[in-house]
Amino acid sequence: MSRIVGVLLILIIGSGLIAPEPNARFSRHFVAAESYESVGVFDVDKNDTLDIVSGDFWYEGPRFWRRHLIGNQIRQDQYYDDFSTIPMDVNGDGRMDFVTGGWFGGTLRWVENPGKNVRWPSHDIAKVGNVETARAWDVDGDGTLEVVPNNPGHSLKYVKLVKPGQDSANRFQIITVAPTQDHGLGFGDINGDGRGDFIVSKGWLEAPTNRAAGSWALHPEFDLGTASVPIIVTDLNGDRLNDLIVGQGHGYGLHWYEQTRDAGGKRGWAKHLIDDKNSQYHCLEWVDITGDGQPELLTGKRYRAHNDGDPGSADPVGLYYFTWDTTKKQFLKHDVAYGQAGVGKGTGIYFAVADLRKTGRKDIIVAGKDGLTVFFNEAK
């Protein structure tokens, strides 16, 4: 009898009616009931152990019970004006600092790790316009990361650290790419020329040979709405053309856009549904979370993104990963945490993925208005 049941189960799974669960299991660890939207992970105190940095505090690894005050982030109504946590040794002293920015202040700034238990000095980089959030990519291909703020309604630009060290004069160079941008930002090679292009809501900007001085040509080939940050660029279907994975940051929907070419070589984009049951897919990561050597899409609902002003704000919150079925060319959804606030878990605006315990498995660290939580990856 058991042999018959086993055969039937194999047939059902093979028919696609049931998706086999990947090798991923998570244990939930509460860190703090703070409402900062962003979290980063790096070794703050140089003891070869990863720590968590979020808002006004850093939390000592590997248990994250002991926390230390960093400073006092400016609060605006229900937000703290702190929308990214990008690790970067800005002053070249061997200690990791971080870069953040705020919507209300419109300023990109770096927060200095002083290497002792005192407040961390905050230094303005530049007034760049309202910072929805920021990301770091190697824009010019020199092997180092640049900071790219998403500034809806302002120019698209990237910020290059050109002079690390104690002398702060001319430390950063700001390169303007386009006169304006909307909500949503991605980076990756669209046309296969080996250079990373910018993806914005209403098209993609082709990288010139000289990123700093050349002209970035806009190709208005789509309209992605209130797109996620980041927009993921990857070749999903193996046709050597990079596709896009796009969430709606302030509405319902998660899609992938297949890059196509007609007989004459003209580029097109075919839109495919991933999930339309959840809203506020603001932050996405493309990372191997199951340990099978293939990346998965890690994302979820940002809890109370516009203080309950977005569609679906009263819906349950969730953190999910989606595995890619290479045969069917579609995504399969798996819950990490789902339910009403306190049971499910929102993503915040900037979350982190890191091997916190040196197990060889990537853990998930998420902040947001529903608190700071670690999901330890317990897969064998």
Image (cartoon, grey):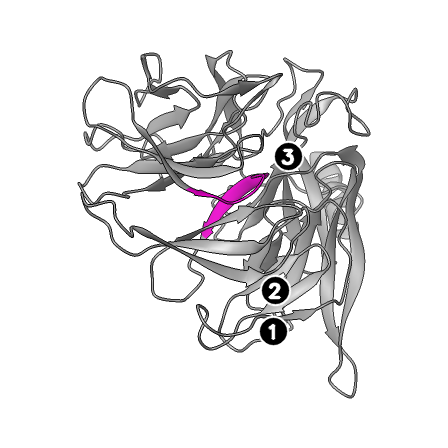
Type of amino acid under label 3: Tyr
Q: Which class describes the residues within 10 Å of circle 3: few (<14), some (14-19), or many (20+)?
A: some
Is residue 232 visible in the rendered image? The answer is: yes
Residue, disc 2: 235
Vertical comparison of 363 with 90: above or below: above
Kindly report the distance in space between the C-alpha atoms of the residues bearing marks 3 and 2: 21 Å
> Closer to the camera, 12 or 82?
82
Residue, disc 1: 240
Q: Determine the image quadrant of residue 329.
A: bottom right
Give the mark nearer the N terminus: 3 vs 1. 1
**Magenta residues?**
126-136
Q: Secondary structure at mark 2?
A: loop
Quarter of the image for the N terminus: give it: top right
Looking at the image, residue 220 sits to the left or right of residue 105; the answer is right
Give the mark nearer the N terminus: 3 vs 2. 2
Residue, disc 3: 320
